[in-house]
Amino acid sequence: MAGILPPELILEILSWLPVTSLMRFRCVSKTWKFFISNPYLVKLHFEKSSRNPQILLMATQRYNPCFLARLCSLPCLIQNPAPSSCGRTFRCPKPYEYLFGSCNGLLSLHNSLSTKKYEEHWVRFWNPATNIWSRPSPRLRLNLRIYDPDEIDFGFAYDDRRDNYMVVAIVLDRSIGKRSVWVYCMGDVRWRRSVTSPIFFLTRDEIESTIIALFALKDVRDERSWSWLLNVSYETLNISPYLHQLQILGMLGDLLLLSYTYLDASNIIITFNFKENKVEHTQTYYRKFIFSCNYVPSLILSV
């Protein structure tokens, strides 16, 4: 085929194939492996895949290091949020059992180690479509006398200025009364201390515990880039803020997909119409932990 068709046309044809097929073709010959590893194909394939982003809905299993996962479009997920059987199983090796981000086909997982004096955090990147893992990141050590271990959030993003992927850890610094920001870029040898931001910009529902406030952060380097999206009351959802753990799974138009844990036994997924301020649909899902993220199958390397 390579002797009949020009390389540009071969790459164009390959860019329309799913990642699973391309990974099988890598084993055919060195020529095919060269084509599929071509950076131009990786970019072209991602551009096509990103036109139809999907939602990865996952639930952990008790006593089993696996994620039960369902990959589908957001409209499909809104219509049928919790099927009785999941379409695909992703095996997540121990001890990385906490997934906190997805970007360009890469998933970012977290683990930690606690002592009486400090707490260490590290991450690892995974492309489930290619099943390629990165090495563990350097460890971020936080002194417990200064930092609050219960007030730490992680984010995962692509930095187009450096053409690299980065993890952002935002943690409460008691000594200055503000949030400290630590950044790890893929391939770096350490975490870098970045800007600080006031606690106010990260507050969700601590004031009255009756309102769910949804904010969006456009730029982690600019504390003014937080923008308010909407408020939803617990009373409207007919749930208690003290008995349920609520999280947002996705948003499509005027519909908001929410999940909350009931008595640590099951999740109830609700479809909420925030324009009309009413619940459209509820469904019980018997998995203790459930979460979701945007996902685009890609050939992007996690190393």
Image (spheres, rainbow, N blue to C red):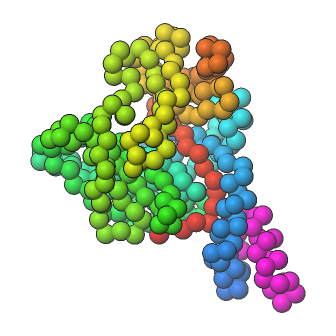
Residue range corresponding to the magenta coloring: 1-26
**How far across and down, in percent of the image, does residue 141 sit?**
22, 54
**Which residue corresponds to the image point at 53% horizontal and 14% vertical from the top-left?**
237
| Figure disc tally | 0
In the image: residue 89, left or right of residue 168 = right
Q: Where the N terminus falls, by quadrant?
A: bottom right
Residue 192 in the image: above or below residue 29? above
In the image: residue 67, left or right of residue 7 = left
**How far across and down, in percent of the image, does residue 157 sit?**
48, 53
**The one of 96 and 213 positioned closer to us in this rendering:** 213
Residue 120 in the image: above or below residue 21? above
**The one of 148 and 173 positioned closer to us in this rendering:** 173
Residue 196 in the image: above or below residue 34? above
**Which residue corresponds to the image point at 70% horizontal and 67% vertical from the top-left?**
44
Q: Can residue 296 be seen in this view?
A: yes
Q: Is residue 97 visible?
A: no
**Which residue corresponds to the image point at 68% horizontal and 30% vertical from the top-left?**
253
